[in-house]
């Protein structure tokens, strides 16, 4: 658990973070979102003491971070940043093995850990362990960056726009990977982005920041349904908010299991349980249907999803 | 494959040593150049001995200069020494516009004649390229890399020795190379203020109007410069190979 209590950071006369309070529960993905310069990175860098805070308290699992030795603290917190910061003169394997080495693991343990992480991130160790960073694509380099952050097996992960410099497709792939890995590892993650869609996609809770202050701190669903003020409303976009909200929920949540399915067969495609309601709406519009068949992984019908049900839910 | 990197410096070294011991074999050639002169090959001092003194002077001053400049460059890029960074950059760049001969001349009144003022002048002048390149090299490291290093929990010493110096090594080494190459030539001028170097035959030749002497000194200095320069090049290549950047070579 990470707690920030009335944390303030000034650069000269400029207040970068203003009396910010925030609690990130263990296993949560807390995403800080806001326009450039609103203090997201500053907030993150205070948590691992890359920056000192001027006022307030920061606690990790109930202990003030000021009471840790800064290097010990940082070795226990994963850190992944935009542009990766991979060491260009080290191989991928050596980059990933850095924190374990700093922690004094045995060479055999380090090697095993590096192999495990390369596999976890979909980078075959035979191919990638010996490569140098300049030989990696942007997406591969960022995967290595994430692997390096995870290497010491930290409970906490700080990520500062890690996918910010990637093209849309690579970014989406990595977001998916991250969700998959998080479902497996349950880390406590503080993730910084300026991209609200990325925030909605990854977050269990979102912190909307503006000029160093918290505008709203809620789950993506609540944020979309009840934006706290005009700033948040503007950020999430007033036009396609409904679709954004629909994208956060699965077909399985509004499924009618008992409905007859015979009259729905035909040319309209079927949906899977884990497809989003946004995909359901899209297919309904495209195929002029008010209901669609839902199937399981084997292609057997499990129920039906209806437009009327979606409308009644309201987004 | 590894030995091939050293082939060139070794070849130049062989040529240099051969020319040093065998200069007298070229006597007929020099006679042909200067039929009227009796002594055509410099004989007041053994060439090998002069080469040794020359190398010693350049090596001692170069080593001292490189170490001092690197330490200074490192100090002014640490948080505690940042205040001196602009001053150090200025000295490094302006200092180099100062001709080496002038440095040599100025050290005489301070230290008298002989090897000592030459050593000091070479050391001082040799500092500048290394200092400048150390600053450039350390400054050229991506801030993201340093941020990551610190964020991963590396100590300042670990960051300096495992990240900063290795990443700056190429540029720093280039500075040492410049420094040493300049000083091989400058050391010869040391002969005018009483140091014994390969400049001796040149000075003697100029005074007595013996072009062959001048030529002999110049040839040996040139070969020494080539040997040293190709040695540095080989070292640079080895560094590149070690970090997987050899595809261009
Ligand atoms: N090291 C620094 N020195 C001075 N000002 C800084 C420094 N770091 C950040 N700032 C300022 O603090 C504000 C917040 O910066 P930052 O946290 O990096 O924003 P974000 O990550 O949200 O884009 C900005 O106005 C920025 O200019
Ligand atoms: Mg930022």
Image (cartoon, coloured by chain):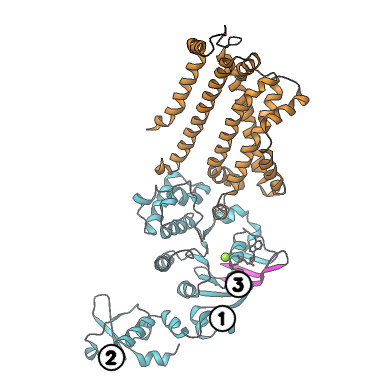
Q: Which residue is mark 1?
A: A232
In the image, residue B64 sits, relative to residue B146, either above or below, namely above
Percent from the top left, x then y, of residue B86? 70, 48
Q: Which residues are magenta?
A: A1-24
Whichever of labels 2 and 3 marks the residue nearer the N terminus, that label is 3
Measured Cα–Cα span from mark 2 to mark 3: 45 Å
In the image, residue B57 sits, relative to residue A285, either above or below, namely above
Whichever of labels 1 and 3 marks the residue nearer the N terminus, that label is 3
The numbered dot on residue A22 is 3
**Quadrant location of residue A9?**
bottom right
Labels 2 and 3 within one chain: yes
Q: Which residue is mark 2?
A: A259
Mark 2 residue element = loop
| Colour for chain A in the figure | cyan
Percent from the top left, x then y, of residue A223? 52, 81
Q: Quadrant of the C terminus of chain B?
A: top left
Mark 2 is surrounded, within 10 Å at the Cα level, by few (under 14), some (14 to 19) or many (20 or more) other residues, namely few
Labels 1 and 3 within one chain: yes
């Amino acid at each position: 658990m990470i707690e920030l209590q009335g944390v303030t950071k000034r650069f000269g006369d400029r207040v970068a973070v203003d009396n910010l309070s925030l609690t990130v529960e263990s296993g949560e993905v807390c995403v800080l979102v806001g326009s450039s310069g609103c203090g997201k990175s500053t907030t993150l860098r205070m948590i691992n003491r890359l920056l000192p805070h001027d006022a307030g308290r920061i606690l990790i699992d109930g202990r003030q971070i000021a009471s840790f030795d800064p290097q010990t603290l940082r070795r226990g917190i994963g850190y992944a940043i935009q542009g990766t910061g991979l060491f260009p003169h080290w191989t991928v394997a050596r980059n990933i093995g850095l924190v374990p080495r700093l922690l004094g693991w045995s060479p055999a343990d380090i090697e095993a850990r590096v192999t495990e992480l390369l596999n976890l991130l979909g980078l075959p160790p035979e191919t990638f362990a010996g490569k140098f960073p300049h030989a990696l694509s942007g997406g591969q380099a960022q995967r290595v960056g994430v692997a390096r952050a995870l290497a010491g097996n930290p409970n906490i992960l700080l990520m500062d726009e890690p996918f910010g410099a990637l093209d849309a497709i690579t970014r989406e792939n990595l977001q998916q990977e991250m969700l998959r890995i998080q479902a497996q590892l349950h880390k406590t993650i503080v993730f910084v982005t300026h991209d609200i869609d990325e925030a909605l996609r990854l977050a269990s809770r979102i912190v909307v920041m503006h000029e160093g202050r918290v505008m709203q701190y809620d789950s993506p669903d609540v944020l979309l349904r009840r934006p706290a003020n005009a700033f948040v409303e503007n950020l999430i976009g007033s036009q396609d908010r409904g679709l954004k909200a629909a994208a956060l929920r699965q077909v399985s949540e509004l499924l009618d299991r008992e409905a007859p399915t015979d009259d729905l067969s035909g040319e309209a495609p079927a949906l899977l349980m884990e497809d989003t309601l946004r995909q359901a709406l899209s297919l309904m519009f495209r195929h002029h249907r008010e209901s669609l068949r839902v199937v399981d992984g084997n292609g057997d019908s499990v129920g039906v999803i209806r437009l009327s049900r979606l409308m009644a839910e309201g987004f | 494959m590894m030995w091939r990197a050293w082939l060139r410096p070794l070849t130049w070294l062989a040529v240099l040593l051969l020319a040093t011991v065998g200069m007298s074999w070229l006597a007929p050639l020099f006679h042909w150049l200067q039929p009227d002169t009796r002594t055509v090959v410099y004989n007041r001092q053994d060439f090998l001995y002069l080469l040794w003194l020359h190398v010693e002077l350049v090596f001692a001053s170069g080593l001292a200069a490189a170490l001092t400049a690197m330490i200074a460059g490192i100090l002014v890029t640490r948080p505690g020494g940042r205040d001196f960074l602009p001053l150090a950059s200025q000295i490094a760049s302006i200092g180099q516009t100062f001709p080496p001969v002038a440095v040599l001349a100025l050290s005489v009144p301070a230290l008298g004649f002989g090897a000592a003022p030459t050593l000091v002048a070479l050391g001082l002048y040799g500092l500048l390229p290394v200092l400048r390149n150390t600053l450039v090299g350390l400054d050229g490291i991506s801030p993201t890399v340093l941020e990551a290093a610190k964020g991963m929990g590396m100590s300042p010493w670990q960051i300096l020795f495992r990240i900063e110096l290795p990443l700056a090594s190429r540029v720093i080494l280039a500075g040492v190379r410049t420094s040493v190459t300049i000083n091989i030539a400058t050391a010869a001028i040391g002969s005018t203020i009483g140091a014994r170097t390969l400049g001796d035959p040149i000075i003697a030749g100029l005074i007595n109007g013996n072009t062959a002497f001048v030529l002999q000194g110049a040839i040996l200095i040139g070969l020494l410069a080539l040997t040293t320069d190709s040695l540095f090049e080989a070292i640079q290549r080895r560094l590149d190979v070690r970090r997987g950047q050899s595809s261009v070579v």
